[in-house]
Image (spheres, rainbow, N blue to C red):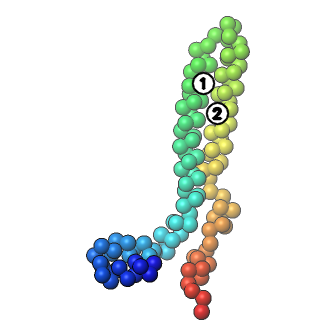
Amino acid sequence: ISWLHDESHEQADVLSAVHSLFQLLEKEKLDILRAPLVIRADIATMEKAICEKRRRHFLDLWTQTDAKEQPDLVRDLQQKFYAEDQRIKDLDRERQVAMTDLAAIPWVGDFYSELEPSS
């Protein structure tokens, strides 16, 4: 940081873009702290899309397979379909933000007190 400070005097035009990173607004600071929640929800959303494709695939195979000729395959496809369905429900729960998640993010006053040097 001290190097950036020294360089900022010599090359003010180059480092002006970087300067805004050191002067975050309150909302930006809280957004940074909320990033793990957003990442978790985004990952769950992507995985849900993959699960929905697999579920549709298993359903298509299941409906095209003759249960009298291949009962084991039909049972296997049915189990895979329901397993994907259950995983989608689990992912929907992961995408929701709970009060315990929000409680882990410090309040604004706590956040600023951590940043300020102690006197």
Image quarter where the N terminus lies is: bottom left
As drawn, 50 above or below 78:
below
Residue 83 picture quarter:
top right
> In this view of the protein, which residue sits in the foreground, 112 or 88?
112
Q: Which mark is residue 102?
A: none
Q: Where is residue 68 in the image (x, y as percent from the top left)?
A: 69, 8
Residue at left offset 66%, top offset 22%: 77
Does dot 2 land on a helix, a strand or a loop? helix
Q: Residues within 10 Å of mark 2 (few under 14, many from 20)?
A: many
Horizontal side, residue 78 vs residue 26: left or right: right
Q: How many labels does the image show?
A: 2
Q: Where is residue 7 in the image (x, y as percent from the top left)?
A: 35, 79
Residue at left offset 60%, top offset 92%: 119
Q: Position of residue 110 (x, y in %)?
A: 62, 78
Q: Residue furthest front?
A: 3
Res 23 seen here: no
> In this view of the protein, which residue sits in the foreground, 9 or 72?
9
Q: Which amino acid does label 1 sit on?
A: Phe
From the image, tell me which residue sits under label 2: 84
Q: Residues within 10 Å of mark 1 (few under 14, many from 20)?
A: many
Horizontal side, residue 109 vs residue 29: left or right: right
Res 13 seen here: yes
Q: Which amino acid does label 2 sit on?
A: Glu
As drawn, 57 above or below 40:
above
As drawn, 8 above or below 105:
below
Q: How far apart are marks 2 and 1 (CA)?
A: 9 Å
Q: Residues at badges 2 and 1 in contact (C-beta under 8 Å)?
A: yes
Q: Position of residue 8 (x, y in %)?
A: 34, 80
Residue at left offset 41%, top offset 79%: 3
From the image, tell me which residue sits under label 1: 58
Residue 2 picture quarter:
bottom left
